[in-house]
Amino acid sequence: MSDAASPEFEALLRRALTPVEPPAELGARLEETLTSISLAAAEELESWELSAMRDPRNWARPAAAIVAGTAAGVALVVLRTKRRSKQRRRVSKNVVDLAERTLHDALNEARRLWP
């Protein structure tokens, strides 16, 4: 590659790799979607009768509901905990305090989702 093409290539790379801010409503839409998945999974599990669980052929839907509901719930906890990370960083005294506050916040969010 020639020396003249190098600055142009670097400029193209720099423009291509600049961070892009996501839309402001993306977080709210993601949280709404995860909440609806969690609720749908809970409704699916509530509709199943224990007597139907004796047959292993009936295990696929409840298992899928458990996996989907758990994944959506964990993602909600992470999303809500991450949202308040800047606030926790401001009030934390050191790294250990920040870790404790983050863990406490995540546990509180999990308790809100799973009473």
Image (cartoon, rainbow, N blue to C red):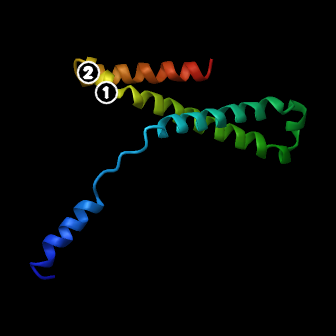
Badge 1 amino acid: Lys
Q: What x and y, as percent, mark residue 3?
A: 9, 78
- Label 2 to label 1, Cα distance in Å? 6 Å
User: Which residue in the structure is indicated by mark 1?
Assistant: 86
Circle 2 SS class: helix
Q: Nearer the viewer, residue 53 or 38?
A: 38
Measuring 38% from the left and 24% from the top, which residue is drawn there? 102
Measuring 36% from the left and 19% from the top, which residue is drawn there? 101
Badge 2 amino acid: Arg
Q: Quadrant of the N terminus?
A: bottom left
User: Which residue in the structure is indicated by mark 2?
Assistant: 90
Q: Quadrant of the C terminus?
A: top right
Circle 1 SS class: helix
The vertical placement of 27 against 22, above or below, is above
Measuring 27% from the left and 17% from the top, which residue is drawn there? 91
Q: Nearer the viewer, residue 5 or 73?
A: 5
Measuring 46% from the left and 24% from the top, which residue is drawn there? 106
In the rendered structure, the answer to whether residue 6 lies left or right of residue 114 reads left
Dots 2, 1 in contact, CB < 8 A:
yes
The vertical placement of 77 against 21, above or below, is above
Quick one: label 2, few (<14), some, or many (20+) residues within 10 Å?
few
